[in-house]
Image (cartoon, coloured by chain):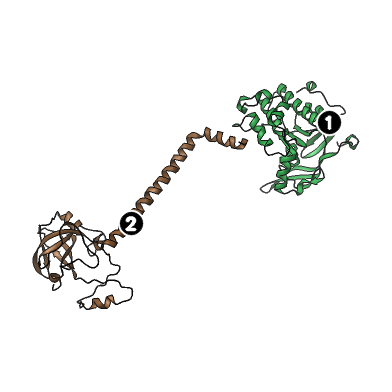
Chain colours: A brown, B green
């Protein structure tokens, strides 16, 4: 070993306290980066997997009183793999409490099968039954904020008419992961929720 | 003053300067460290450079040793002009041909005496072994001691061993006894003297101790960056006769 290498090794040995500290800081930094990178990749993979499994849509188009026949036109556009249609509107929810009323975003779902896009993940209860007009599925955050469960009843003012709805399921949707009421910047889970109901019921509304 | 009649003519010149000037610029101010200096170091001779602090001795030695470059004039080493050397050539010159001894030893504290000398012998072309070099300075029994375990005189002798291990043509000593008491200083001078006489290494010693002048073949007195006087000793003094 050359004298210069001996010098280097001896001086490192004399500074072993600092060297160990530096090594630990570097090791901690590397571990943090690896851990954060791993978490990030896992989260991205989970997100992609969730979007893939629920067939999260890429594009939304709002139309007023569009005929169902439009769907075929939409699917014929080059690059469009699948198109789905639904009826959606805001309605006041009647909780018999003072203050600003709660709002529900009603979204139609087919009574047989599942939505072609933006499918629901039912966390509790079940999907709506065919031919039953008062069944509703609630978004999970709203249900938790209001302590509502499958089997409970919910009152909504739809087109000026009070309707009693029976909660049959609690679900999440990739479309409403971050449910923000109209005119607000942040989610208000006690005041705003998403309700999925039979297309045949909401369609005429 | 310079007396040509006293110039030693027989030995060939190893290092010489002609019209050597060195100017340091400090902002707008210029400090003339050397003014038209002409010196000759003859082969195998011991030259003593005498002068007060600030007289330009160290500047001259640094230029002779390739540690600094002149502002003007020539520095010839065996008929090659150091003033025209590139940095790379100057590095080779210092590495292969010049040994330095400094006032404060400049030993590496984390290396033993043997390893301090090995630093040089590992990169020189035809070196002595560290053990041989340390034997020359009488430190055979201190090979594996660290600088902190050695006295000032012993440290300076290790520095001398390190300087001569490469078998340099020229040994340049800048105040080698400046940090030592008289007894230890004499011991260090005797080692330098012996190396000069046994190895025939051309040697220059800077000092402001006039008593050391008798030790050299040639004595150069410097003042304000100029050569004030050059003398030669017909007979070199015995070290023991030197009064501090």
Residue A162 is at least partly visible in this image: yes
Residue under numbered circle 1: B217
Residue A118: % across, % down: 24, 65
Q: Is residue A124 left or right of residue B25?
A: left
> Which structural element holds mark 1?
loop
* Of residues B106 and B225, the one drawn nearer to the viewer in this rendering: B106
The residue located at (66%, 23%) in the rendering is B141
Q: Chain of mark 2?
A: A
Q: Is residue B148 above or below residue B79?
A: above
Q: Which of the pair A94/A196 is nearer the observer? A: A196
Q: Residue at left 21%, top 78%? A: A69
Q: Quadrant of the C terminus of chain B?
A: top right
- Label 1 marks a residue whose chain is B
On the image, the x and y values in percent for residue A110 come to: 17, 68
Indicate left or right for B173 with A51 as reference.
Answer: right
Q: Which residue is mark 2?
A: A45
| Image quadrant where residue B233 sits | top right
Marks 2 and 1 belong to one chain: no
Residue sitting nearer the eye, A129 or A140: A129
Label 2: few (<14), some (14–19) or many (≥20) C-alpha neighbours in 10 Å? few
Give the class, few, some or many, for how many residues have Cα within 10 Å of label 1's Cα (few <14, many ≥20). Answer: many
C-alpha span from label 2 to label 1: 86 Å
How many marks on residues?
2
Point out residue A98 in the picture as x, y percentages from the top left corner: 12, 58
Residue B230: numbered disc: none
């Amino acid at each position: 070993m050359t004298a210069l290498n001996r010098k280097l090794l001896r001086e490192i040995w004399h500074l072993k306290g600092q060297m160990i500290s530096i090594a630990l800081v570097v090791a901690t930094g590397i571990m943090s980066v690896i851990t954060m990178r791993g978490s990030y990749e896992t989260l991205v993979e989970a997100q992609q997997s969730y979007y893939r499994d629920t067939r999260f849509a890429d594009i939304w188009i709002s139309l007023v009183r569009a005929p169902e026949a439009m769907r075929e036109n939409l699917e014929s556009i080059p690059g469009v793999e699948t198109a789905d249609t639904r009826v959606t509107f805001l309605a006041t929810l009647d909780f018999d409490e003072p203050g600003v009323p709660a709002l529900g975003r009603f979204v139609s779902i087919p009574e047989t099968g599942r939505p072609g896009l933006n499918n629901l993940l039912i966390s509790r209860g079940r999907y709506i039954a065919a031919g039953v007009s008062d069944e509703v599925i609630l978004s999970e955050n709203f249900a938790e904020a209001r302590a509502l469960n499958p089997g409970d009843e919910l009152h909504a003012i739809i087109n000026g008419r009070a309707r009693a709805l029976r909660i049959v399921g609690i679900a999440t949707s990739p479309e409403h992961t971050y449910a923000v009421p109209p005119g607000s910047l942040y989610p208000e889970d006690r005041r705003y929720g998403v309700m999925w109901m039979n297309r045949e019921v909401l369609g005429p509304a | 003053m310079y007396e040509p009649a006293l110039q030693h003519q027989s030995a060939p010149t190893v290092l010489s300067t002609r019209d050597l000037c060195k100017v340091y610029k400090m902002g707008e101010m210029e400090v003339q460290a050397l003014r038209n200096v002409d010196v000759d170091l003859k082969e195998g001779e011991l030259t003593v450079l005498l002068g007060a602090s600030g007289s330009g001795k160290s500047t001259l030695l640094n230029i002779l040793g390739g540690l600094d470059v002149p502002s003007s004039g020539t520095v010839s080493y065996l008929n090659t002009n150091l003033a025209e050397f590139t940095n790379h050539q100057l590095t080779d010159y210092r590495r292969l041909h010049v040994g330095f001894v400094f006032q404060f030893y400049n030993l590496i504290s984390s290396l033993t005496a043997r390893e301090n000398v090995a630093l040089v012998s590992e990169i020189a072309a035809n070196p002595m072994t560290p053990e041989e070099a340390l034997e020359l300075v009488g430190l055979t029994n201190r090979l594996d001691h660290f600088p902190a375990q050695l006295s000032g005189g012993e440290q300076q002798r290790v520095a001398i061993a390190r300087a001569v291990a490469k078998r340099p043509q020229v040994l340049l000593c800048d105040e080698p006894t400046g940090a030592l008491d008289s007894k230890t200083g004499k011991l260090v001078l005797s080692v330098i003297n012996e190396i000069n006489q046994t190895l025939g290494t051309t040697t220059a010693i800077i000092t402001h101790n006039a008593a050391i002048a008798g030790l050299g073949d040639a004595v150069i007195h410097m003042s304000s960056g100029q050569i004030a006087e050059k003398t030669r000793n017909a007979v070199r003094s015995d070290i023991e006769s030197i009064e501090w």
